[in-house]
Image (cartoon, rainbow, N blue to C red):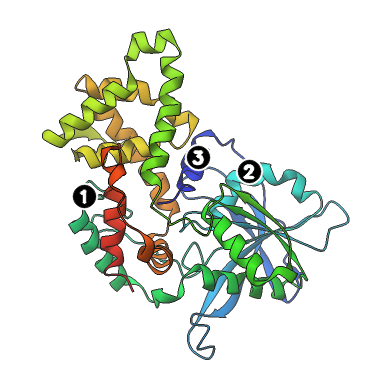
Amino acid sequence: MHRSTGLFAGAALAACMLVAAPDAAARKLGTLEFEPCSLAPEGLALTVAAQCATLSVPQDRKAPDGRRIELAIAWIPNDEGKVADDPVFMLAGGPGQAARDSYPLLHGAFAEIRRTRHVILVDQRGTGGSNRLSCKDPRGDNAFSGDDALDVTASVAFAKTCLSQFDADVRHYTTTDAVADLDDVREAIGAEAIDLVGISYGTRVAQQYARRHPDRTRSVVLDGVVPNTLVLGAEHAKNLEAALDAHFARCTAEPKCVERFGSPRANLDALLAKARAEPQLVRYRDPQSNAPREDRFDAATLAAVVRLYAYAPTTGALLPLALHEAAQGRPEELLAQARMLTSLVGESIMHGMQLSVICSEDASRLGADAADAATTLGTVLVDLLLAQCAVWP
């Protein structure tokens, strides 16, 4: 639910195909034995050669002799010559994204880093291969991807069902636990100090690690900073309006865009007003399976769709066309594209882990802002999170 979901959605549409074969032999780093593996994000023809291992850690650090879980770790080795002693840890966002799944989209951005350093990826507990807390609804959809995704009552029921499916004590899947896990990995690979690259929510993890372990932190890079004072979920409505203003300004500055599609903002406002007054069922073809679908097109669905589009320039550029078509009584393409984007984002987010972080760390400070009521998104995500956190440990 946080900003970095857009990293996945936007990069998934723009990424070049990168294919590499795994290294042939197993290797050792510190005390960990690694095996050749390939990192491949769900649903994308994109792989990166790596070495993979696991590390056993306590689920509850106050009960070290109790249940243990395995952390999934990937190592992108530097084989070009002299390697610096401090490896780079990439920390994924969300909360709920797995580092090993997120990294292939960013492999090229790490090219200079990889000339002198190893890259280490740890799936934060509750994500990827680290006792993942992912949820599927009874229809097989990922959480929050169905037509009742933004319905509070349905989402609370889903959270309860989701919770009952986990073999985990979800109280121990927080940022604090993740920081302790990272330091265990650092020790296991034999590094005296490490460099941290945090992305969106990953910047919170990086800041917390540096605060708790300043002597083991050589450097920190924060990309899309989430200050520790920021309450996750509280700023989504304001951020969306700012993003839409920027996207729409590009159209209104181009006479041919206005001539062809009219005012994107006026079209959006008209669609929202109609969707609030007269929600409708829309039949369309699923863009991935071509199966017929029928989804509810109401104001909450429209807001969620627009939010996904606004995450990246490649999809944001489609908004004037998509809103124009919908305003002309043809919302099918808008819903079909939304279905595809939601699926990509949904598959990358482990919603159980996300709720464990937000409900433990942010919910007590989260509240609806009356000023958000007039925005495209309104207070729906805040309402949703508060309702789900009321039933989440």
Of mark 2 and mark 1, the one earlier in the sequence is: 2
| Circle number at residue 148 | 1
Element carrying mark 2:
loop
Earlier in the chain: of badge 3 and badge 2, it is 3
**Residue at numbered disc 3:** 12
Residue 114 percent location from the top left of the image: 76, 50
Secondary structure of residue under mark 3: helix
Three-letter amino acid code of the residue under disc 3? Ala
The disc placed on residue 380 is none
303 on left or right of 119: left
Q: Hey, what amino acid is under mark 1?
A: Asp
The residue labelled by disc 2 is 19
Which residue in the rendered view is the most extreme toward the right? Answer: 82
Query: Relative to 27, does residue 97 appear above or below in the rendering?
Result: above
For disc 2, the neighbor class at 10 Å (few under 14, some 14 to 19, many from 20) is some
Taking the spot 39% from the left edge, 46% from the top edge, the residue there is: 236
Determine whether, in the image, residue 307 is placed left or right of residue 194: left
Inspect this view and state whether residue 377 appears: yes
Q: What residue type is labelled 2?
A: Val
